[in-house]
Amino acid sequence: MSPASRVQHAIRLLALLHQAGEPARAPGDPPHAVLAVRSERRLQALDFWLRNPDYLADELVTEVEADRLGQEYLDVAESLLDDPEPALRHYPMPRWLFGAYERLDDAFAHLEGYGLAVMRRTPGGHRNQFFLLPDGSAAGDELAASTGPLGWYPRQVQLVLLVAGTSNGRQLKDRQYLQAAYADTELGSNIGPIADRVRERLVELRETS
Amino acid sequence: MSELGSAVAERPRGAVPEETVEAILTEARVATSAAVPTPVRLQVVSVQFSGSKVLTQDAGNTKGDATAGVGDGVTTEPFEFSWTLGPGLHVVGSHENLRGKSTVLEVIRWALRGRCRLQADVRSWLRHVQVAFTVGIEHLQVSFDVTEGSPHGAVLLAGGSGPAVQLVAFDDEDSFVAAMDAVMMPRLHLQRIAAWQSGQSVEHTWVAYAGALSVSSGDGLAYLIGDTQFSGLPSRLLSMFLGAAWTAPRAEALTASKAVEASLTNLQSRDDEREAASAGRREQAAAEVAAAQALLDDQPDSDGRLADIEAAVNRLGGVSADVALLSGQLQDLRAAEQDIRRQLKDEQARKHAQLEDALGRRFFNALRPTACPRCAAPVTEDRRAQEQQGHECSMCSTDLDLEAFTREVLVSSTAPAAEREAALRSATLGASAAIAVESDPDATEDVADDEEGAEAALQAALNQAVRSTTAVAADLREANSERDRIMALARSGREVAGALARRREAELALARAQGALDVLQVTQTDGEVAQREDLERRRTVLAAAERVTADWVRDAQKEALVRVSERITQLARDFGIPQLTSIKLSGNATMKVFKGGAETNYTGCAPGEKLRLKVATAVALLEAGFETQIGRHPGLLTVDSPGSEEATTESLDTMLRALGAVAAASAGMQVIIATTRTDLLEELVPPEQRRIAEPGKYLW
């Protein structure tokens, strides 16, 4: 599986910022910034689910199991596993100390070059915060309206957010650690697929429900 | 070939070869030629006997000189009688009955035949008897003592000058009979008269002959000829006396035929007995066969099934190998399929990534760059103009690839080749395609026509792999179910083998029962069959011989019988049956009697008539033998007490006179009569030929 191109990465980030960002009203936020994602770990975690439909399906099953989502999401989970569309957009991520991680500088630079988003370090310099600018918001709208292959990402982000909710980056990473295959992956290696295990869970759940 | 053999072989013609006929006749001792020996004459030469009368006082014995007493009221009186005889008529007579004349005749007859017909008291009185005969040219002397009625003595042959030679001795009546038979038969050249009685061949020889030489009143009149009745005996005596040449062979053939018939009957009854004996066991064996058959029928025929199972189990190794092979193939095929599927998926993902990348580039290319993301230096209008005209990047002023630029693609001439290709790929989408691709997957063809072949080839390879996998999987399923089926068969094989063993056992039981039944089937051995065939052949021959000889005897006798019948008629009239019209003597020794316009037979006549007819027949036969010189009548006749029947004195005289005439007619003839009719005796009989008791006196 070849890694996604810088352009594809940029598209994902645009979709994530556009839909997962919170209003940028905090003091010190760049002027004109519309939305903000204040944790790279959260952004990385969201991107992981976006790029690994089998892990997303696993989370959906868990949510149905926990009765936080309806039974109809089992069908959604199944389609994530078996439909060709998600498989075409499966881009495994390597695992680093803080979980799945891929440098997003080049991709984010792409957004910055066109004046769609900006990244700022927190005053303490410990965290990167990501802001969507008005042109980025317009581009995000245009992407969300697309019915072509690129339009798939905004729709998938909705499912990711359904699972992620408002959890912060650490909470999301903790959840991803629970996904066994994810945890067992050696540092620096791509996180392996768990599609088979999820299918089993689906069958079990359908049989018991 | 003998005369009889040829004739027998003719009936039925060719049924039995002549050689075989001869052999059978010889073996059965049937004479095949009719050589009739010249008759040999028999005469009584002398008769002597002595003993002691035992008389009771009350018996009214008038003889006063009884000297020896044996007890109260009982006296004994020795007696002795001696008479020398010659040829011709002899008479022993008394004026009253019970004067001892019959004793004289019976003593002669006893010595002649060996069999005693004396009354018990007289017999017990006798102590010694001696009777001399001439037989042909020989002088025989029968001499015996009598102890308590039982004879003990010998037959002596008197030589011309030397002492007498004992021919045979006897010590009871049976051996006496046998002795006389042995002495007389060969000397008289008499053929044995064979007859069949009570299942065994009996030869009524001298006793039977000699019986025909006597006529006695009373019980002796039962039969026309002789005093013995056996099957056909009178007719054979008749034939013998009438000199029919084939009489003896006929009798021999008949007897042999009956013997063979009896053997056949024995054979049959033996078979019948054997059949009956085995019938019960055979029934049981048949029942056992039926039971075994039923048991066998109940057994399922597992042969075919077991064969199927064996064949299937034999295939198990092959099928298992198939399963292993197919499993390996399927695994490989699935791995290959997975590999192809992954490759295809990778290819599709790669193409999709290219598509997304191209679409993304177009998405961003539509936007205007604003500032450098690194240093935030703004992208000015000048720099935008310079990009259009000077072909420098409006952001970093790097020279742009001119060829790409002419296709409205912005990419640095120093950018990596892959980046330039991706950039150019976005240009090929075209303005309209960029929108169309949103919903039309076919639009992707525009992106990568050159790469379409790879996916198609992979898809084709995948299809092929799927087909192969499906086919092999189906084969494997088939092989597995075949193996399962075989395993199930093998498990059931044990049951079937058991059923088969039971069936084999039932078959064996049936065979055993059938064998036992077969053994019990009564079959004649080859020897038995041959024996039966031999007997039947002999019966055929002997029966034919009997018929042939019977015909010949009948033909020969026919004329003789007519003459004899005329003679008997004449004699019987003379003897005192004046009303007799005629008689007709048949070959079977029966006599039809026509008298006073009525027809009767011998046994239907009154005792007096019987006596006359019997005497007339005896005389006629005796005469006929002498006339023809063929008949074997020995020429001796004894007639006892004709007067005891109700004959008149006139008729008795007539008979006496007639007998005298007969006896006188031939020198070799001797007739001895016991009678109470004494008036004519002096006139008819010379003194030496008569012994007459004085009136009131006893002969001895």
Image (spheres, helix red, strand yellow):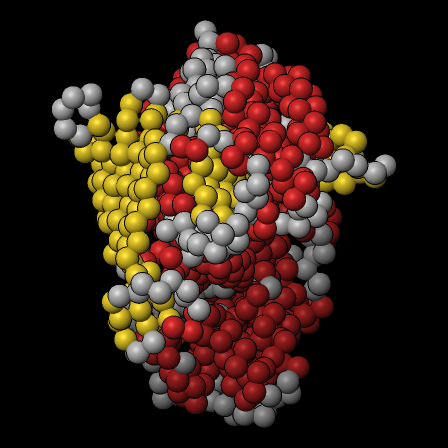
Residue sitting at the far top: B1
Q: Which x, y percent locates residue B338?
A: 45, 53
Front residue of B461 and B327: B327
> Up-down: is A141 above or below B589?
below
Front residue of B305 and B530: B530
Residue at 58 percent across and 75 percent down: it is A77
Residue sitting at the far left: B162
User: In the picture, which quadrant includes the N terminus of chain B?
Assistant: top left
Q: In this view, does A104 lie to the left or right of B440?
A: left
Q: Which x, y percent locates residue B209?
A: 45, 34
> Up-down: is B298 above or below B654?
below
Q: Residue B547's quadrant in the figure?
A: top right
Report whether residue B192 is seen. yes
Q: Which x, y percent locates residue A124?
A: 36, 88
Report whether residue B421 is seen. no
Q: Is residue A163 left or right of residue A135?
A: left
Front residue of B487 and B175: B175
Front residue of B569 and A17: B569
Residue at 41 percent across and 49 percent down: it is B699
Q: Residue A207's quadrant in the figure?
A: bottom right
Residue at 64 percent across and 72 percent down: it is A155
> Up-down: is B168 above or below B484?
above
Residue at 28 percent across and 41 percent down: it is B130
Q: Which x, y percent locates residue B667?
A: 46, 19
Q: How many marks?
A: 0
